[in-house]
Every structure is written in C-alpha cells, then in structure tokens.
Image (cartoon, rainbow, N blue to C red):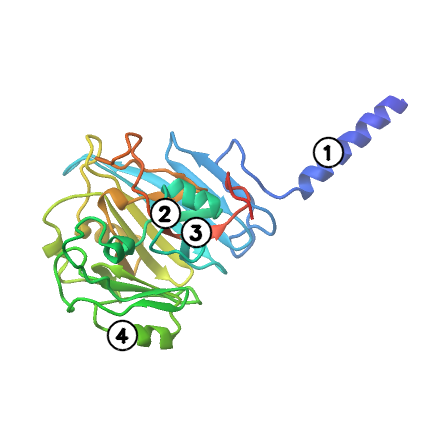
Amino acid sequence: MAGRKTVLLLLLLLLTMAAAAPARAGEAGDWPELNAEGYLDEGEFVYEDPENGIWRYCSETLKVEILKKTETKPAKLIWYEAEIWSRKEIFGFVTNEPGKHFQSADWPTKVCSKNGAVFAINGDYASNRWNNIHYPKQRYKVGILLRDGEIMSRETKKSGGTSFPNLDTLAIYPDGNLEVHESRDLTAEEYQEKGAIDVLAFGPWMIRDGEFNPHLPKFDGYKAPRTCLGMIEPGHYIAIMAEGRHKQSKGATLTQLAEKLADRGCTLAFNMDGGETSCMLFMGKQINKVGNASSKKGYARKEPEFLAIGTSTLVEGYEP
C-alpha cells in the first residue's frame, strides 16, 4: 500500500512539474495553447520540420511561422514565407563582431547563432559597397545608412534609378513601424530626426501605401534568388526568400514577389540584396539553398551583419 502511495505521489509530482514547465519543442507541430494576444504566457515553443517545410516559434512577445512553398508554372520556384508577429521586439542588425557592421564577415549560421537570433534574413549588403569588395577599381555610392541610430553614410544616387541597387531605403523605427523611400526622399539627418534606428539602402521599394512601385517591371529582366521584407502593420510582417539558380528553382522577379506580399496583406515592402547574399535563417540555421554559391552546401555568402528579430537561449551556439 505504501508503495502505491509513493508511486501516486511521484506521478502527481511529475504532472505538476510538466504543467509548470515552459512550452518547448515537441514532436507535434501544432501551436501550443496561446493567450488572447496570440502569444505564450511564459516560456518558448520551437518546432522544426524541414522535410515538410514548417518552422514555428513562439514566446511571450514574439511569434514566427515559416512555410516552404513551391510552384511549377510558369517556372519551377521554391520560396519561403515567414509571418512574424511581435509586441515588443523589432527588426535590427546582428553582427559578427560588436559594432562592426561592415567588416569582419562570417557565414550566416555563425553570425546568427552567436547572437541567438530567432529569425533572420540578409540585409542590404552595404559592406560590399563600403569596402568595394567586388569591383575595387570602380567607386560605388554606399547609400544613406543608419545603424543603431548613428549615421554611417550620407551619399546616395538620384531617385528613380532602375538598376540594382538603386539605393532606395528602408527605415526601421522603435515602435516597429517601417518606412520605404526613394533614395533621395530624405537625408540621413532627417531619418535621424524622425527617430529611425536603422536605415538600409538597396531597393527598389516594392509596395508603399498599398501601391506597387510603377518602376518594378524595369527590374524584372531576369529571375534570381531574392529576399524581401513586407509589413502588414507595425508588429506584423511578412518576409519572403525565393531560391534560384538551381534545377529545382529558377528564381523570381520582383513583380512576382510583390504580388505574393500584397496577397498576404502587405501595404509596404522592400527588396534586399539577392543572389548569393539571399538567405533566411531560423534559430541560427539557414533553411534555404543558394544556387551557384561558392559553398558546395548552398550556404549564402559571408557577411558582417544580418537583419534579425528575437533572441533565444535555445539557439544552439548562443552564449548570452
């Protein structure tokens, strides 16, 4: 009898501990019970199913769902749609070394893992222009850049350019709001006065106030790997990364991706650098393949910074 009581007490203790434990990765991919705001009351939930193309994360302040999608017509295309909800975190840059946004590059997985990034994509590849990496004999304008509220560059191109990058800008604000502008709509000082934390320069902007950029078709001369970030409203975002340059996926045009972002409800969207720079990461792991990359494993190129949201101690390799 005493033995049965002991067993019952142990079972009761285990059930109590399980109920009190924070939500964590499980075999099933269904979301755990969420509160009225759509988040967890405590702890973190992580689910990764690369075979079926599903990645999910949730905490008390951040929720991320990534779905891998495919189509065969008019051409083969693989793309990843990430939906992000946040009531606290905002997008910002994680760097390979603290404060070094344009030097000290490393693989995306290493940079994002060491920073504990929950979700990340490549940014504007400003280090390429800053350091004249690919064409050292040709001087490129860097674009209007802010990092952590500090002006890094003021030089830019004339507005209305139709070649990559035309140096249109994406501005990120502390309340989670995003703005897109043509390259010379605002000066670096005006972004700073408005309170922008980060300003990226690449482009073109794709959607603004719900309207497509009328110049988008001029950028659609070829399909390639591409990364875009859209906003439904502050705190609710859609990011898309399209694979390209390999047999399973030919790449996408900006008009294609703008249509997909608009279908998801985005009233604003911006094009990041593409090609071998283009990538999407979840919990420190790159989930996409990059065609024609220098790495045989399909890794995106090394960079000193990546645009990320959320931090978790569950990211392997993160040491806070």
Question: How far apart in space, not on screen, are marks 3 and 2 (Cα)?
Answer: 27 Å
Specify the label residue 97 is tagged with: 3
Question: How far apart in space, not on screen, are marks 2 and 1 (Cα)?
Answer: 36 Å
- Label whose residue precedes the other's in the sequence (1 or 3): 1
Q: Is residue 248 left or right of residue 15?
A: left
Which image quadrant for residue 85?
bottom left
Q: Is residue 228 left or right of residue 157?
A: right
Q: Give yes or no for contact between labels 3 and 2 (Cβ–Cβ under 8 Å).
A: no
Residue at label 4? 187
Question: How far apart in space, not on screen, are marks 1 and 3 (Cα)?
Answer: 43 Å
Instruction: Give residue 160's position: percent from left, percent from top.
Output: 14, 66
- Label whose residue precedes the other's in the sequence (1 or 4): 1
Question: How far apart in space, not on screen, are marks 1 and 4 (Cα)?
Answer: 60 Å
- Label whose residue precedes the other's in the sequence (3 or 2): 2
Q: Residues within 10 Å of mark 1 (few under 14, many from 20)?
A: few
Give 54 or 293, whichever is nearer the viewer. 293
Q: Residues within 10 Å of mark 2 (few under 14, many from 20)?
A: many
Q: What is the three-letter code of the residue carrying label 3?
A: Glu
Question: Nearer the observer, disc 3 or disc 2?
Answer: 3
Q: What is the three-letter code of the residue carrying label 4?
A: Thr
Residue at label 1? 14
Residue at label 2? 82
**Mark 4 falls on what kind of element?**
loop
Question: Nearer the observer, disc 4 or disc 2?
Answer: 4
Specify the label residue 64 is tagged with: none
